[in-house]
Image (cartoon, rainbow, N blue to C red):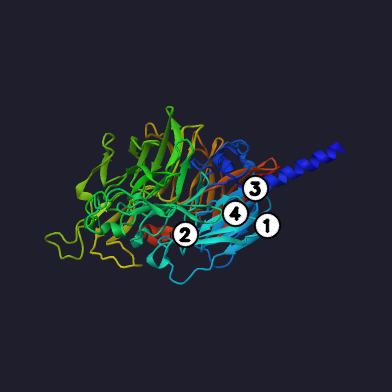
Amino acid sequence: MKRTLLSLLMLAATAQVSAQGVTDAMIANDANTPDNVLSWGLGTQGQRHSTLNNINAKSINKLVPVWSMSFGGEKQRGQQSQPLVHNGKMFVTASYSRIYAVDAKTGQKLWKYEHRLPEGIMPCCDVINRGAALYDNLVIFGTLDAQLVALDQNTGKVVWREKIDDYSAGYSYTAAPLIAEGLLLTGVSGGEFGVIGRVEARDPKTGKMVWTRPVVEGHMGYKDGKENGISGTTNASWPGETWKTGGAATWLGGTYDPKTGLAYFGTGNPGPWNSHVRKGDNLYSASTVAIDVKTGKIVWHYQNTPNDGWDYDGVNEFVTFDMDGKRMGAKADRNGFFYVNDATTGKLVNAFPFVKKVTWATGIDLKTGRPNFVDDNRPGDPTAAGGDGTKGKSVFSAPGFLGGKNQMPMAYSPKTGLFYVPTNEWGMEIWNEPITYKKGAAFLGAGFTIKPLFDDHIGSLRAIDPKTGKVAWEVKNSAPLWGGVLTAGDLVFWGTPEGFLKAADAKTGKVVWQFQTGSGVVAPPITWMQDGEQYVSVVSGWGGAVPLWGGEVAKKVNFLEQGGSVWTFKLMK
């Protein structure tokens, strides 16, 4: 009788914990709990590293698919989502603002929510979604018409819905939200439309705004409905009224480090692309911005490309890690340079090229933190003397504006001390044109053509030492790499547009396994443990910016087929 009563009490306690759902403590410890995946990046730091090693170089020949689920319908296009796993359920988003709950062990679809999108949405770079956030009993994701939707994890019913901004002005949302210190942190997409980039914090249970922080200098921040200080100083680095359409969209989302208490968001290109219209550094565009989560204020910033004239953005993820006893952050920027900054102060510690050809700068001055520009490689001013006013001097720049690395997240292994970076080698012919802002219209003022640099490859997965800048190994790929990376134990997993999910030895780069998923992989893999077995999952579905914006490269990969599915693998017994 006593044993039965004890059992009942234990069951009740378990049920109470389950009813509490995902907690702040669980999210903070996500990187150390391999029985689930609660955040984009397998931990808020974004290292994308798992300690699981059941699947290793010796056992991986037994890795086989156990289920695959199709997103269905004709709504395929690019699939860039990183799934989340909690309490035996997988939550995965798909193109056109859809989200699914799936039995993580069997692949059985539990529920589906399809957001009703209005006519006239203006996604820059395909109708993609990169993932969701979990909090309490909610799963929260953003939509292409710039809304946030919170659903009940068990039923898929809408609990709350909040508008981020006006989609008709070019705003959208494609990133995975970030949970930090009990707040839901989001950015905005739409940098090509003259929007104003910002980071916002909401109560994840209700969607109520807590604070908002613009990342274009001159705009006011707010906290609890009250003014919370202007970002920077009006007109200090933006001439005239250019700050009012400054871009700097925070479209990839952010990372958070509990050791520093800071959230790190990359900011996108300034608007328009034509840099001669907005002479100055144009803070805080093309930067990493560190924000105090509790106050909503910028603690430090580091600008990767001042007065960006090539659409190099600065939105790539800032991954925190330990190096020489200090907390550091690393970023492989679209501009072709790999940066290491002090995560607490922002001080630049190291910077080096991680692609083979960089033409816009000869290097980064470690004392000043500024690039050494090559003046002749900036696209010319269309209003310069001697021209006809319709087109500035054309230049060939490398990397191309799609970047040495774009949205596909890199991974870091504390075991090897290396970053595993999906890189691309391409350049572009680029020129400037006159431009005037018009609400809801593309705000570029530039023309371009992307071109491959080498015959044998565009993409390359590179293992990079952040201390020395040396490439320990690389695996070349014919098509551009556009999916993220996962390290698990002694293995590295990544996908290719040709449809393969691959695994390599993390120390040597020797490819030890691959599987054809049927469509291009442009999403990051995950791994988790359930019922004593290790699983690996990845979303498959070719698309994204490359076929839309890729110029000569797009022609080279036009044979690749679209799709839309989730593949899950485990070791065969």
Q: CA distance from mark 4 to mark 2?
A: 29 Å
Q: Residue 554, located in which quarter of the rendered image?
A: bottom left
Q: What residue is at 88 percent from the left and 39 percent from the top?
A: 1
Label 1 sits on what residue type?
A: Gln
First in sequence, mark 4 or 2: give its number.
Answer: 4
First in sequence, mark 1 or 4: give its number.
Answer: 1
Residue at the far top: name it.
Answer: 325
Q: What residue is at 60 percent from the left and 39 percent from the top?
A: 33
Mark 1 touching mark 2, by CB under 8 A? no
Q: Is disc 2 surrounded by few (<14), some (14 to 19) or many (20+) residues within 10 Å?
A: many
Q: CA distance from mark 3 to mark 4?
A: 11 Å
In the picture, the disc for residue 257 is none
Q: Is disc 3 surrounded by few (<14), some (14 to 19) or many (20+) residues within 10 Å?
A: few
Q: CA distance from mark 1 to mark 4?
A: 20 Å
Residue at the far bottom: name it.
Answer: 119
Describe residue 267's horizontal placement relative to residue 27 as left or right. Answer: left
Residue 287 position within the rendered picture, expressed as x and y whole percent measured from the top left: 34, 46
Q: Is disc 1 surrounded by few (<14), some (14 to 19) or many (20+) residues within 10 Å?
A: some
Disc 2 is placed on an element classified as loop
Viewer-side label of 4, 2? 4
Describe residue 372's horizontal placement relative to residue 251 as left or right. Answer: left
Q: Which residue is mark 3?
A: 20
Q: Which residue is mark 4?
A: 138
First in sequence, mark 3 or 2: give its number.
Answer: 3
Q: Which residue is mark 1?
A: 108
Q: Is residue 423 visible?
A: no
Label 3 sits on what residue type?
A: Gln
Mark 3 touching mark 2, by CB under 8 A? no
- What is the quadrant of the C terminus in the image? top right
Viewer-side label of 1, 3? 3
Label 4 sits on what residue type?
A: Leu
**Does 95 appear above or below 25?**
below
